[in-house]
Image (spheres, rainbow, N blue to C red):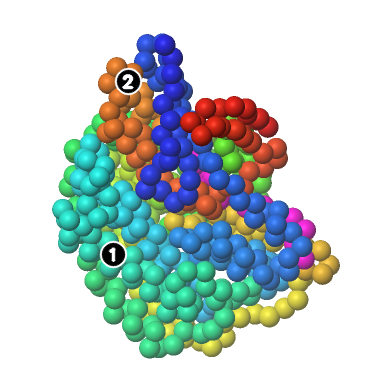
């Protein structure tokens, strides 16, 4: 008989979700769905707020990547003011973003995914977590904690708080950098680079033991979208859009971020609160694309820093075209940590970064503003409209995790078909289905901003758990 398997909740991710696998009469997987089960409506409840509050408000979307929202929101507000952010302030924003990237990628790799990679996909789930990793590999766990601490420390020293700082403001930042703070951060960079390089060597050293996972963890042709610099280098704060295909052939390039709506459409499905962005020229659902570390490394011509560029050369050896397996999000994440550390050092060694001119002040000079940045998980878009009083009349957020929604759904189906069979369903097989989602490091608290009619399923159960009544919308 046909049946369903529900994995609820999906573990070691940020936010709440479940996976439903649909098996046919022969016990084989026919379909799979990734349900995001929480809803947060930031677009709607920010309407009527003064635009200058938006960076601080939208940073509350997430406790893991508030800096990404601060920056995208502030950039949208910069456009509303129609000002040029002072060069020192832009560099400080970039350093803050590098700290965000370091701490978030370290959390994803060491705390959330390393238990699978180092303890094994089939390890006892009672031990397959960060505490079990600390017991089995204390040096590696210690490295992960220190590296995340470095990223968080950069954020705190610059902005005054590790979580939800309000230092990034429309027109720049709230205060200049001191030489003392600059020097403290620079002193920590060498140890961070050593840890990142060790982690990269460790990961590449075990790749051969995960060939089946590499082959089936969302390993399929797709488009890849990200920001790049105008000369094709890795860019996390600013830049232009580039889209490449599975052969790394450029499909669209040098696209102004203000034209995002010409390239990105948004669809909804009744079984998830997470929108389904798609590449508009290909239509829905054929316009599947991926964002994030894997997409960024597939898109760029080079990273632009020595250690990251050397690592990118080795990364590119895995495929003639784009690296397609989402298992390699982990690999790309580690390369980006190297890049973020190198770029931080480069920015801090610029003498102009100590300038006290760090904010442009103006009244609103435009009714519409769009801010785009590369969050750790991928491209983040904030789009605002205001009235004559500077109050928000409309907002749209396209969150990094949302871009990957179609790819995650297709990925769990591919993995489930390989590992889940009705006559021998194991915990390790179901963990592999979850692990596909972990590759993307989804931030579901950020991403649930569905468009249009909301999916709703209410159940009335008695104390034994029997469903007495239900309603669906």
Q: Which residue is mark 1?
A: 145
Q: Most extreme residue toward the front, as rendered? A: 463
Q: Which residue lies at the image location 17% right of the left edge and 61% below the top edge? A: 139
Q: Which residue lies at the image location 28% right of the left edge and 28% below the top edge? A: 426
Q: Which residue lies at the image location 63% right of the left edge and 43% below the top edge? A: 450
Q: Splitting the image into 4 quarters, where does residue 285 fall?
A: top right
Would you place residue 64 above or below residue 16 in this image? below
Q: Which residue is mark 2?
A: 421
- Secondary structure state at the residue bearing disc 1: helix
Label 1 to label 2: alpha-carbon separation? 38 Å
Q: Which residues are magenta?
A: 391-408
Q: Quadrant of the C terminus?
A: top right
Does the segment drawn in magenta span residue 405?
Answer: yes
In the image, taking residue 168 as reference, residue 12 lies left or right, namely left
In the image, taking residue 229 as reference, residue 138 lies left or right, namely left
Asked whether residue 101 appears in the rendered view, the answer is yes
Q: Position of residue 205 (x, y in %)?
A: 17, 47
Q: Nearer the viewer, residue 440 or 200?
A: 440
Q: Position of residue 180 (x, y in %)?
A: 38, 88
Q: Position of residue 311 (x, y in %)?
A: 27, 54
Would you place residue 139 above or below residue 464 in this image? below
Asked whether residue 347 appears in the rendered view, the answer is no
Q: Which residue lies at the image location 26% right of the left edge and 31% below the top edge? A: 212
């Amino acid at each position: 008989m046909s049946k369903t398997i529900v994995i609820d909740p999906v573990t070691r991710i940020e936010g709440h979700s479940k996976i439903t696998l649909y098996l046919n009469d022969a016990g084989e997987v026919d379909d799979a769905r990734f349900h995001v089960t929480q809803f947060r409506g930031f677009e709607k409840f920010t309407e009527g707020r003064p635009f200058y509050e938006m960076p601080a408000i939208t940073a509350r979307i997430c406790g893991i990547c508030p800096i990404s929202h601060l920056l995208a929101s502030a950039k949208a507000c910069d456009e509303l003011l129609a000002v040029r952010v002072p060069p020192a302030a832009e560099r400080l924003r970039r350093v803050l973003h590098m700290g965000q990237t370091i701490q978030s990628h370290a959390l994803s790799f060491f705390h959330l995914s390393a238990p699978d990679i180092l303890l094994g996909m089939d390890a006892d789930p009672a031990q397959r977590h960060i505490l079990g990793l600390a017991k089995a590999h204390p040096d590696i766990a210690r490295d992960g904690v220190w590296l995340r601490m470095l990223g968080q420390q950069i954020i705190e020293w610059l902005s005054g708080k590790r979580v939800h700082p309000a230092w990034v403001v429309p027109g720049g930042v709230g205060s200049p950098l001191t030489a003392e703070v600059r020097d403290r951060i620079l002193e920590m960079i060498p140890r961070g680079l050593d840890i990142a390089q060790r982690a990269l060597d460790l990961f590449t050293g075990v790749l051969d033991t995960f060939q089946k996972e590499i082959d089936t963890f969302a390993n399929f042709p797709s488009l890849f979208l990200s920001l790049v610099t105008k000369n094709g280098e890795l860019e996390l704060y600013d830049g232009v859009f580039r889209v490449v295909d599975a052969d790394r052939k450029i499909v669209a390039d040098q696209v102004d971020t203000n034209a995002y709506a010409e390239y990105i459409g948004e669809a909804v499905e009744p079984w998830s609160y997470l929108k389904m962005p798609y590449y508009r020229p290909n239509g829905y659902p054929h316009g599947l694309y991926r964002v994030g570390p894997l997409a960024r490394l597939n898109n760029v011509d080079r990273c632009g820093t020595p250690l990251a560029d050397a690592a990118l050369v080795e990364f590119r050896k895995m495929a003639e075209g784009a690296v397609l397996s989402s298992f390699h999000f982990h690999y790309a994440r580690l390369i980006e940590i190297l890049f973020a550390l190198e770029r931080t050092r480069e920015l801090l060694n610029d003498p102009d970064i100590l300038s006290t001119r760090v904010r442009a002040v103006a009244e609103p000079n435009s009714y519409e503003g769009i801010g785009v940045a590369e969050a750790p998980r991928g491209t983040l878009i904030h789009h605002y409209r205001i009235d004559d009083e500077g109050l928000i009349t409309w907002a749209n957020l396209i969150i990094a995790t949302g871009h990957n929604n179609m790819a995650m759904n297709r990925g769990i189906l591919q993995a489930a078909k390989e590992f889940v069979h009705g006559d021998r369903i194991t915990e390790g097989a179901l963990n592999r289905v979850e692990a596909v989602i972990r590759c993307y490091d989804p931030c579901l608290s950020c991403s649930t901003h569905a468009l249009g009619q909301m999916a709703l399923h209410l159940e009335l159960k008695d104390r034994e758990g029997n469903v007495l009544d239900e309603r669906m919308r």
